Image: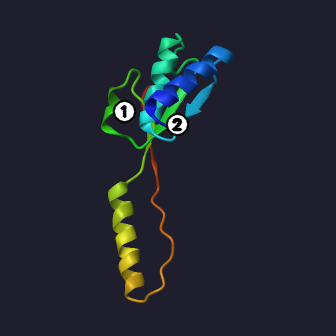
Amino acid sequence: MTPEAVHAAMAQRLAAAPPPDGIFAASDVAAMSVLRALAEAGIDVPTTTAVIGYDDVTLAAHTSPALTTIRQDLAEGAALMVDRLMQRIAGHATGSAIVTPVLIERQSA
């Protein structure tokens, strides 16, 4: 969804029903659109509705309130994928890899 579509969907939801206790957005950009819709509706974040994003983009720390988010280490993930690919090309069996995400606590949750 585009940021505009997320904003419109959230505004429509808020017009039809009481605000939810919390929202977990699939990206920080979507979460920022949610924050804007909540602010326009006069809903306090995080007192009424907590918002959490995903990605920890640079702007997440600069929203109002600052966005709580989940950071994934993209560099580590990319290095692991390249390593696994090179092992497979060399004919070796490879297993799965997990990159542990980190919760970055700010003011929105």
Q: Is residue 33 above or below residue 83?
A: above
Spot occupied by residue 26 in the image (x, y as percentages of width and height): 51, 41
- Secondary structure at numbered mark 1: helix
Describe the colour scheme in one phrase: rainbow
Amino acid at dot 2: Ala
Spot occupied by residue 22 in the image (x, y as percentages of width and height): 59, 28
User: What's the mark number on residue 60?
Assistant: 1
User: What's the mark number on residue 17?
Assistant: none
Q: Residue at x 60, y 20 (%)?
A: 12
In the image, 98: left or right of 17? Answer: left
Kindly give the residue lying farthest to the right in the view shown.
17
Q: Residue at x 45, y 59 (%)?
A: 99
In the image, 88: left or right of 20? Answer: left
Spot occupied by residue 94 in the image (x, y as percentages of width and height): 47, 80
Spot occupied by residue 53 in the image (x, y as percentages of width and height): 47, 37
Q: Residue tagged by mark 2?
A: 25
Kindly give the residue lying farthest to the top in the view shown.
42
In this rendered view, identify the residue nearer to me: 73 or 2: 2
- Secondary structure at numbered mark 2: loop
In this rendered view, identify the residue nearer to me: 81 or 76: 81
